[in-house]
Amino acid sequence: MLITQRNQYALRAMLDLAIHKGGGLRKSSEIARARNIPPRFLEVILSQLKGSGFVKSKRGYQGGYTLIPEPAQITVGEVLRFMDREERPLHCIACISKCKCSYDDGCAFSNLWSRVEAAIYRVYDGTTLQDLMDNESAMTVEETG
């Protein structure tokens, strides 16, 4: 199960907001530059994330984005589920679309794919933005040390 580019960008943006939490509003251009995200794509993602309860924004010259909860209170799984909320019912983890699956409910692999997805989400649900921040800090220390 590969994570989509859109979801990778969403997680990068959330990590950036987590790192800068408490430091004021963060402009989308700053996030895009710091996290190597195409600016136009980031605007769409941030707009979606505003509806998650994780992010709030302020418009205007002094505007920007900020994280609402503490980074330790947001899991990777929550972010991914939010980003996929409209797509998940139509997609199978193994197939492009359940609507186009010739096996319908008779797929011999269905149980396997469901167990794989559950195992992956256990990892995602056990990983918070704070964990990602800690990982990034440890990598930075290793590079400079």
Image (cartoon, grey):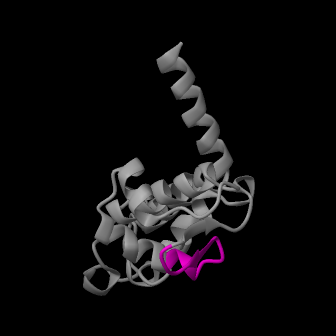
Question: Can the viewer see residue 144 in this picture?
Answer: yes
Residue 11 included in the magenta stretch of the image: no
Toward which corner of the image does residue 3 lie, by quadrant?
bottom left
Q: Is residue 119 above or below residue 80?
A: above
**Residue sitting at 60 percent across and 78 percent down?**
52
Split into 4 quadrants, where in the image is the C terminus?
A: top right
Q: Nearer the viewer, residue 139 or 84?
A: 139
> Would residue 126 be found to the left or right of residue 31 on screen?
right
**Residue sitting at 64 percent across and 37 percent down?**
134
Q: Is residue 136 above or below residue 75?
A: above
User: Residue 66 at what x, y percent from top left?
Assistant: 61, 66
Split into 4 quadrants, where in the image is the N terminus?
A: bottom left
**Residue sitting at 61 percent across and 42 percent down?**
133
**Residue sitting at 61 percent across and 48 percent down?**
19
Toward which corner of the image does residue 138 lie, by quadrant?
top right
Q: Which residues are magenta?
A: 48-61
User: Residue 49 at what x, y percent from top left?
Assistant: 53, 75
User: Residue 90 at what x, y percent from top left?
Assistant: 39, 83
User: Residue 22 at what x, y percent from top left?
Assistant: 70, 56
Residue 51 included in the magenta stretch of the image: yes
Q: Nearer the viewer, residue 134 or 62?
A: 62
